[in-house]
Image (cartoon, rainbow, N blue to C red):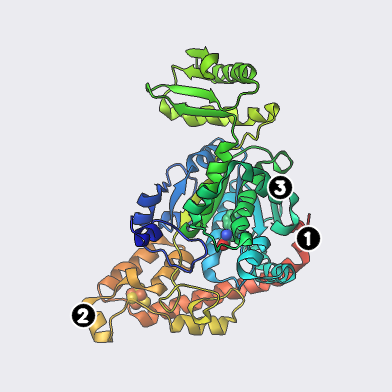
Amino acid sequence: MTPEDAKKARIDPWASTQYEDYNRLMEQFGIEPFSLDGLPNPPKLFRRGVVFGQRGFSYIKSAILEKKPFAILTALMPSGKMHIGHKAVMDQCLYYQSLGADIFIGVADIESFATRGVSFEKAKEVALEEYILTYIALGLEPERCQIYFQSKRTPVKDIAFTFARKLNWSTMKAIYGFGDSTNMSHAIAPLIQVGDIIHPQLPQYGGPRPVLVPVGVDQDPHIRLSRDVANAHRLYSVTKTKDGRVGVFIKVDENVEKLLEKAQMIVSGLGFLKLEKIPKYKALYVNDADFGDIQKLDEALAPVEVEFGGTGLFPPASSYHRFLTGLTGAKMSSSDPPSAIFMTDTPEDAKKKVKRAKTGGGVTVEEHKANGGNPDECVVYELFTFHLLEDDSELDGIYSRCRAGEQMCGSCKALAAERVEKMLVGIQAKREAAREVLDQYVVYD
Ligand code: TRP
Ligand code: SF4
């Protein structure tokens, strides 16, 4: 591999790269497609493929379908203004909250200090003013929801330290490309993120259960790290065996007999009958299970580990969403105001930005009418898709009329501007009321 290839083969969560070739990334990093099958009333971000990929989502799906506890964990970077692109994560949280999820929202103040030099006081101010008030205004409910600060949550920091025992530098180099000049606080930040992702499964935060982390692909390195580290702390491993069977294996040397006995009890309780226990291999073969049963076995065995001093961690699950393009056609970024609609923009300013947005329309009206426009390369159409049009048939209508040269950019922009105005007016009015109830959400630990 050339150094160029090596770079391409890595996702750098701190670069301002705009990832576009999602299919290639999925293939390269083994991200699975996101399927809507079985999800009750999927909101538009799901129906329209904005949420396109996942790791381990089947654990979340089974929790949803069987009405078992599960949690969502996300975190905000308190280092810039919240813009409409950031809203996608909250929309997903609101959906899962309506399905009964516990919601954990971290303020990534250790990360913003480590990677951007933001002070903890500043981070708190930005988090509350720019993000949290808007989250509440968007409809986040205080029940089963907690917003915390990385810097204040001791268990998050403890995980960073204690779980580091199972991590070596070569793994960190391989995942992040760290080298001699890597700043140590930068090297620690991903471990804190592992702490974020794992801590909802600690007993005091609800215990072992599936946790979903909805992210953009740039965060995938942290997800892989979290999944690896969580797995390394398991006592049981349920896997396919080389001879095509399903086996439960004990990964530690203590309590092997007891762990096997317990597994036997649990597995037979699930209705499996052909069990074969071989202590010498630290194994319990489940001869009447097929590969499709692995998850069910794992779900039943994980929580039991706590009795044996284990973590019982479910593999952290993730979902990946596409990023909204900036209004200018470049990346939507807080540091490039014309590219973004900020949640605190005045509706007037926001409308102006929409009117100036880059479209996929023809250069002249005549050309547009003759050849049609290209909604796939149009930021206004993207705004409709992600945030501004609920009705799928209305959206499809714009798509085909645009292609046919019957829909004009001017009328699209007018509609988008009107919708943005309405959205911002609604949110901004509720932000003031949210101030009064902040205490019901934010935990200062
Ligand atoms: N690294 C994330 C970002 O840059 C923020 C973050 C910190 C996060 N901890 C997290 C995201 C846990 C998801 C889950 O935006
Ligand atoms: Fe975009 Fe609408 Fe113009 Fe088509 S007509 S390019 S969807 S703004």
Query: Where 157 sits versus 20, above or below?
Result: above
Q: In the drawing, what numbered circle is on residue 44?
A: none
CA gap between label 2 and label 1 equals: 57 Å
Image quarter hosting the N terminus: bottom left
Residue contact between numbered discs 2 and 3, judged by CB atoms under 8 Å: no
In x, y percent, where is residue 194?
60, 50
In this view, the residue in front, 409 or 158, is 158
Which residue position holds label 3? 158
Q: In the drawing, what numbered circle is on residue 370?
A: 2
Residue 432: name its quadrant. bottom right
Q: In the drawing, what numbered circle is on residue 439?
A: 1
| Residue 144 shows up from this direction | no
Q: Nearer the viewer, mark 3 or mark 1?
A: 3
Taking the image as shown, residue 159 lies to the left or right of residue 379, namely right
Label 1 sits on a secondary structure element that is: helix
Circle 2 packing at 10 Å, graded few (<14), some (14-19), many (20+), is few
* Residue shown at the point (60%, 66%) measured from the top left: 115
Label 3 sits on a secondary structure element that is: helix
Amino acid type of the residue tagged 1 in the rendering: Asp
In this view, the residue in front, 118 or 79, is 118
Amino acid type of the residue tagged 2 in the rendering: Ala
Amino acid type of the residue tagged 3 in the rendering: Asp
Which residue in the rendered view is the most extreme toward the left? Answer: 370
Residue 270: name its quadrant. top right
CA gap between label 3 and label 1 equals: 25 Å
| Residue 419 shows up from this direction | yes
Q: Nearer the viewer, mark 2 or mark 1?
A: 1
Circle 3 packing at 10 Å, graded few (<14), some (14-19), many (20+), is some
In x, y percent, where is residue 76?
62, 62
Query: Where 228 sits versus 18, above or below?
Result: above
